[in-house]
Amino acid sequence: MALLEILEFPDPRLRTKAQVVTEFDAALKTLVEDMFETMYAAPGIGLAATQVNVHRRLLVIDVSEEKDQPLVFINPEVTIVDPDTAEYDEGCLSVPGFYETVARPQHINVTAQDSSGKTFSVQPEGLLAVCIQHEIDHLDGKLFVDYLSALKRTRIRRKLEKQHRLDAG
């Protein structure tokens, strides 16, 4: 297993739309293991392949307190069950150090495949539903900062760009 580099906003590669996964092979299983290792080490509760510069429709999540309930969603599709939204403070491994309130549907249905290619469906609520939607946004080239005002988004981008310059220098 290996730790992968997590891309950080405003890296343009985060805007790449992920492609459908068609091969469920050993390389995919290794990628899933590496993504879990990277997510747990960061530490985070979700990671999309786009964030590690792999532009395939794959995400890993573990919202459990003990970090012992890993979930894999490959080629996920979301259907809104109830359009009522709830606000959550969201953070992101690609936007380190920032948390902002985002409103998302609370009740969704997700159909996806596991790492063997088997199709399954779940109807998550609460934090898991929010996390899945957040990670699927990554697969579509969207970040949680896109839900914020232009002013807030610019402020976050400038702070991260300044931090990247300090880290490089």
Image (spheres, rainbow, N blue to C red):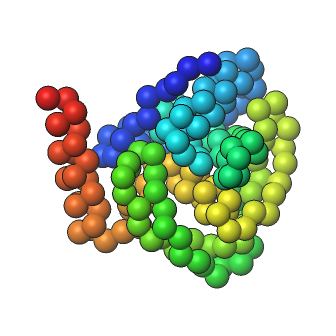
Image side of residue 36 versus residue 7, left or right: right
Say above or below: 98 vs 47.
below
Residue plotted at (23% across, 38% down): 164
**Which quarter of the rendered picture does the C terminus lie within?**
top left
Say above or below: 98 vs 70.
below
Residue 140 place in picture, x, y as percent? 51, 50
Image side of residue 126 versus residue 163, left or right: right
Residue plotted at (52% across, 42% down): 43
The residue closer to the viewer here, 144 or 70, is 70
**Which quarter of the rendered picture does the N terminus lie within?**
top right
Residue 16 seen in the figure: yes
Residue 49 place in picture, x, y as percent? 55, 36
Residue plotted at (66% across, 73% down): 106
Say above or below: 130 vs 39.
below
Q: Quadrant of residue 44?
A: top right
Q: Residue furthest bottom?
A: 84
Residue 27 place in picture, x, y as percent? 67, 18
The residue closer to the viewer here, 113 or 8, is 8
Image side of residue 73 versus residue 4, left or right: right
